[in-house]
Amino acid sequence: MKPVTKLIYTCALCAGVKLLIQRILNITMLAEKQQSELDFYSPLQSLYAQYRSEKEAVIKVSETLDSHAVNYFFEAAYANNYRMSVNATDIFKLEPAIKAVDAKYWQSAMMLTDVLEYMSADKRNEWHEQIRTHKTPEFTIENVKATLQEMLRNRDMLLAERVDGIFRNLSHEHVTNCPQGFGKRFIMGYMRNYCSVAYEKANYIHDLRCVIAKFMGRDGVQGHNTYADLNNIKLDGQWNYFDGGAIKIRMYKKGTAHMEVHPEMAYRLNQTLAFLHPHAIPAEFRTPPKKKTKEHNLNYDLLGFDVLNDLENFVKMYHSSNWWFNNKLKNKKSEQVIEYIGGVKLGGNEWSFDYDPKEILREIKRSGCIPEYKSHQYYPTPEHIARDAVMMADIDDSDIVLEPSAGQGAIAEQVRELHPVASLQCVEISKLHCEILKQKGFEVLNADFMRFSPGIRPDKVVMNPPFSDGRAEQHVVNAFSMLSGNGVLVSVLPARFLGKEIIPGCEHTYSHVYKNEFAGCSVNVVLVRICR
């Protein structure tokens, strides 16, 4: 073959191969597109088939019923119940029945996507009302596809509308609410209907949680969880923390809900609000806070909503002193949380507690977090070390005993068991641990021990202080300064303190070394008894 002819042949061959490859790619892309559409629309097609079947059944009933004969059955049934009779010709009209079927299947179609979670509370309430009153459009594939696609395309707008709905539904009667935008604190009125939270109002707080969850990079909380969380709030004006401290809410008997959002979240809410009202929100409301707040910490390391949903089911399944799940837990983390708050697995799905953990689980579910080991330095004192510490303190039944940094009460339980008559005061920084201690029947003060000042000087202090950053020695010195004249302090300390004089001029008695006794950390400890 001549060189020129060979070149032409090679080019033609390459072009043919290229064309063949392009056709294969086109076929593959078409197949993928068809598969994608099939994946998206298969559930909808299946739903529509069910709809047509039920619609035809309704038409058949309407066409074949002898309404005059059926009247007697209804009149007899209502007469036996001392109610007014109902005309069956009104009940079996075809058009209202078809509307009822339409509404039912529209609701099912909306559940195929997360579109309801993107709607504002106003639109979600409006949509639920349309379903309740059977005023939805006709249920057709075209209507459903067009509606869902339009909503999914406008997610950013829907997010802004949610924030706008929250802002518009704040109370107009309270000067706390700022007309220029969201402040740090705001108030919503008429939160309650009779004995429970008003569902429509709960929707706006649910929107607030969902929007802030997006800001924090979390999935959205489910609406029924927010409604349950709000109903579990006591009407005592005390703050309840939600979602790692991003929101805190307190409620009153008159029906008002006071809310406070973290400053980092307030300005982001205003930025989102400015998406709809760019000229109405002043610049100072849309800028990040210059100073970090010290009183209101924000925790981003939160439990997933799959774990929180597990805990919601756990709260519902209580019997006597044992708790159980009907279904297998979806997340191993759920078991770790339950173990952390004192649950003991008995086997299968059954657990046991030595206190009622219902309020604790509700607190975790609201806040989305449990006390961090690192920040609170919480490592439960093993039972035998706690007992040794209490015995080393030589407590009399007439003594006033103080346990700082009480955790979940490992030492306090030994004091109560060995000296039930002694007066015992616990101090604990974690609100969650305080709730656990209260449920166990201990007197507890929620406070930072290093800022704590006792009303009456204790005779004995038994403690397991945090070890990191030199805090162990600081806590011991602070606790010893609180003792009465002849008081005694016993503390768990890192083994490196063995033989050290912590309080000058006082008698120090050390125990033997306990090696690797604490779960979750490899640390050796000793007990020290200090007295004047």
Image (tube, rainbow, N blue to C red):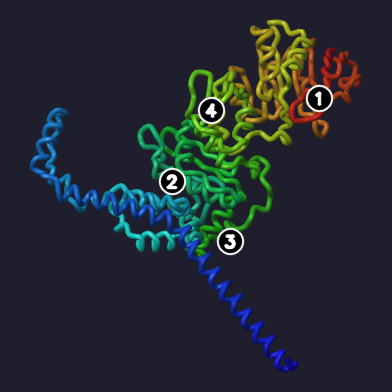
Name which residue type carries label 4. Answer: Glu
The residue pinned by badge 2 equals: 203
Please tell me whether mark 2 or mark 3 is closer to you in this view: 2
Dot 4 corresponds to which residue?
359
For the residues labelled 1 and 2, the Cα–Cα distance comes to 50 Å
Q: Is residue 313 left or right of residue 397?
A: left
Question: Closest to the observer: 3 or 319?
Answer: 3
66 lies left or right of 527: left
Compare marks 1 and 3 and give the one earlier in the sequence: 3
* Numbered disc in front, either 1 or 3: 1
Callout 2 environment at 10 Å: few (<14), some (14 to 19), or many (20+)?
many
Q: Nearer the viewer, mark 3 or mark 4?
A: 4
Q: Residue at x 44, y 62 (%)?
A: 149
As drawn, 173 above or below 316: below
- Given the image, on which type of amino acid does mark 1 rest? Asn
Where disc 4 sits, the SS reads helix
Q: Circle 3 sits on which residue?
A: 283
In the displayed structure, does residue 109 sit left or right of residue 321?
left
